[in-house]
Structures are given as structure tokens and as C-alpha cells.
Image: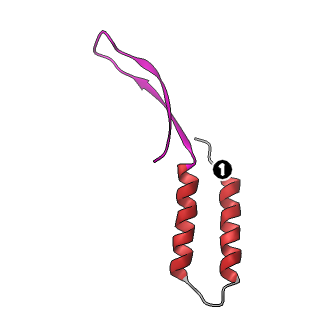
Amino acid sequence: MSLNKAALKTAITILLTDMLEKESNSIEEFANRLSNEIEIFVKSGTVTVNVSTTGSASAQTGTGTGNIT
């Protein structure tokens, strides 16, 4: 699973810079925005799996690829 760590780092840097420029502290806003960026980061990955079934005349093997949802 390949994740875009550079994009996450950029998003966190932008978030921290924005939060430092605010007049008032908002831990709740920071937590919400950071968790959103982490969710985007994790869901951007692709999972690849090997599939193998046995026990019937139509047993199959192969690979599968999909997004994290």
C-alpha cells in the first residue's frame, strides 16, 4: 500500500501555520481538521491482496486491488 506521505506533511504544515495565525485557540477545530487530513491520507492508499479459494471444481486464485473505504 503506497501512501502519499509528502501530501500529508504539506497538509499538516498548512494546518499548523493557519492555527498559529488565529487570534484564539481552538483545540476542537485543530482536532477536527487534523483528523480529516489523516482520513484523506489513509483512504488514499490502495490495498492489494492475494485471493485463493479451495474445495470445489471452480476454485479460483488471483489478486485483488481496491481502495480503503
Query: In the rendered view, would you say 39 is above or below 4?
Result: below
- Foreground: 69 or 2? 69
Q: Quadrant of residue 13?
A: bottom right
Q: Position of residue 65 (x, y in %)?
A: 51, 33
Q: Quadrant of the N terminus?
A: top right
Q: Position of residue 14 (x, y in %)?
A: 70, 69
SS assignment at label 1: loop
For the point 56% across and 76% down, which residue is it?
30
Q: Which residues are magenta?
A: 44-69
For the point 50% across and 79% down, which residue is it?
28
Is 66 colored magenta in this rendering?
Answer: yes
Which kind of residue does numbered mark 1 sit on? Asn
Residue pointed to by mark 1: 4
Is residue 37 rendered to the left or right of residue 18? Answer: left
* Crowd rating for badge 1 (residues with CA inside 10 Å; few <14, some 14–19, many 20+): few
For the point 59% across and 87% down, which residue is it?
25
Number of residue marks? 1
Q: Position of residue 10 (x, y in %)?
A: 71, 62
Q: Quadrant of residue 24?
A: bottom right
Is 68 colored magenta in this rendering?
Answer: yes
Q: Position of residue 45 (x, y in %)?
A: 57, 45
**In the current view of this chain or complex, which residue is farthest to the bottom?**
23
For the point 66% across and 53% down, which residue is it?
5
**In the current view of this chain or complex, which residue is farthest to the top?**
57
Query: In the rendered view, would you say 21 is above or below 32?
Result: below
